[in-house]
Amino acid sequence: MTVVNGGGSEAGGQGGGRTRRDAALCLAIAFATLTVYVPSLGHDFVTLDDYPYVVENEAIQQGLGLDTVAWAFTTFHGSSWFPLTWLSFAVDHAIGGLDPSVYHRTNLFWHAAGAALLYLALASLTGARGRSAFVALVFALHPIHVESVAWVAERKDVLSAFFFAATLLAWSHYVARPSAGRYVCVFVALALGLMSKSSGVTLPFVLLLLDEWPLARTQVAWSKRIVEKLPLFVLAGCAVGLTYVAGASGDALESEAGLAFGHRLANAAIAYASYLRDTFWPADLSPFYPHPGRGVSVGLGVLCGGALALVTAIAWWRRRTAPHFLVGWLWFLGVLVPMIGLVQAGPQARADRFVHLAQIGFVVALVWSIPTRVFDTPRTLLGLRVVALFTVVAMAWATRGQLEIWENGVTLYEHMVDRSPNSAFVRHGLAQAYQRDRRFAAAAKADRRAHELAPEWVAPMVGLARALDAAGREDEATPWYARAAERAPHDLGLRATLAERLIEERAFESAAPHLEFVAANGDAVAAADALVLLGALAEQKGDVALAADRYRKAAALRSDLAAPHLALSKLALAGGNEAEAIAALRAATRAEEESLVAHNDLAWHLATASRVSVRTLEEVRRHAERAAALSNRQEPAVLETLAVVQLAQGQRGMARDTLDEAIELARSGGDRALQRQLLRRKRALDRANPGGEAR
């Protein structure tokens, strides 16, 4: 292998000295990264993806068993496929539950490790340690990468970057001494990166570029270089296929519809230019840059595209004298292709996280353009080091400032609103953050503004309804639920919520069609819940037979739901069928072992039934004690049931104590009617046993 480092005297010594210097530089890079990013350890989760990815994701919270592993490798949750990222979240949860500092610590660890490994990879590829260290520091500390580190949901970025660097290092070792074992290391590193995030699909192309420079594999024919990478291309192709299927399974690709390719091409050219500008002057970074849609400036797109073509032509023209620039420039252009918006996914024009790996190539092109002679004289070398130090300090300072906006969901979205005040997406996100912070009036205001900006978008309508609900303004919330359901008639959850609200307002006739739609089209859980409510509506109309039929259908759909059995027991009691009512209550306790109502009602009706056997008394006691335990002995009505059971078993003293406990709870809870009922029951007990009970 021929290494073209262009590094002059900066390449360093040999052997053990070089190894010690590599170790020292790795530690310095990692330490600088940790020092700058340490405030992120005190940050909270943000509402943008952190909740569906982590906080509300039961799959990663079920432990590290085979079920979790199987889920991670088969799910398209979040319209993506990245099993290694899911497993890393599961490990964090096993360590610290939902403590956000644990997740931020892991993100920071992988970013610091990735920056150090990038140094080793570039140093191994080029032999230029000083230049490699500077590129690694830019990667570690540039504020454009804050989004990838401070955002828990972007764990996939820091993981994929680590394995991207690992693949580069493994390729350098393979080219130095080809062997099957070393090729397997390249393959595994790439596979792990793709299982973290599919953005590494362009890495085989990057390896082809590196074969030109710095590896200078001119003695190996192009065809052979391509053939040796075929397994890597196949691996990348599989990742592309999985990513497309995952995106199609959700709504990740829907935003492409209706946007002409010319508009997407213009936005892509502007995005490339914006990434270059932000590399030099990251003064106005934001987590969200709204896509202008058909309003994109085609003229500006043509201008940016022309500039990109000109730089590419110059790089190609100088490919023999400055191969590093062509390689770095094509690295930058090529790695961004999957995320540049030619296939539009999402409402953004671009995103800082998209340039996480691509920027490395551009910085390589710049840094290796510094003439070798600069390193050969003490004065110019000192000047270069001063400029490098100033650049690193400036980046660290800017990154600290950028970190502040990621403190929590509210700070994040308030910053986004400042940058994009007319974005409905951002306004709705701010409303969600306010709701998480229980600032319901502010949430309602933000969603009203989002609705004004995007009148046909359903999400702000639902958000506004929920905010009004939470603020106690239910009468204002219902019309917004209705408006949202009108625009999204196939949203089962929305129609079920609207139906429940209409029932609360006693608008039964209006609620019925929504419930019937959910019962006919929903899954077993949604349909069963709807059937229970439909049964209650039938009862309201006096149609007992229809109500019972709906309750039985609900019970057949869900074996773990007590509600239909409880409703059937009430119907049976109303019809004077005590045995049928008790059978339904027994079914309810089997369906939901944790149902306090089922255990309490069964105990009560067994204890007060017309015929009670000794065997039944034991069953009564078991259910009464279970209900008392489920209520933590804090429900006076449940304690009344327990007292009746104790009395039926001849435990008058215990019954009296339980009644005293229930009376005190009713008194402290302000339930005077129940308190009077319990006092009457206690007086009756005292009259029946005036002498008390020996204990």
Image: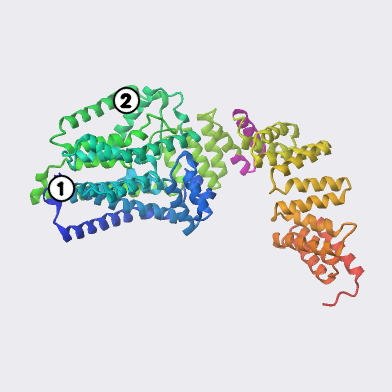
Pointer 1 residue? 384
Q: Could one spot residue 281 in this view of the protein?
A: no
Q: Of the residues shown, which amino acid type is indicated by label 1?
A: Leu
Judged by its main secondary structure, the magenta piece is: helix
Q: Of the residues shown, which amino acid type is indicated by label 2?
A: Gly
Q: Could one spot residue 145 in this view of the protein?
A: yes
Residue 386, relative to residue 21: is it above or below? Answer: above
Quarter of the image that includes the C terminus: bottom right
Residues shaded magenta: 466-487
Q: Which mark is residue 522?
A: none
- 348 in magenta: no
Q: Secondary structure at mark 1?
A: helix
Q: Identify the residue at image location x=20%, y=58%.
A: 19
x, y (%) of residue 616? Answer: 83, 61
Pointer 2 residue? 301
Q: Residue furthest bottom?
A: 694
Dot 1 alpha-carbon crowd within 10 angstroms: few under 14, some 14 to 19, many 20 or more: some
Q: Nearer the viewer, residue 100 or 79?
A: 79
Q: Quadrant of residue 273?
A: top left
x, y (%) of residue 560? Answer: 68, 49
- 470 in magenta: yes
Marks 2/1: CA–CA distance: 36 Å
Q: Secondary structure at mark 2?
A: helix
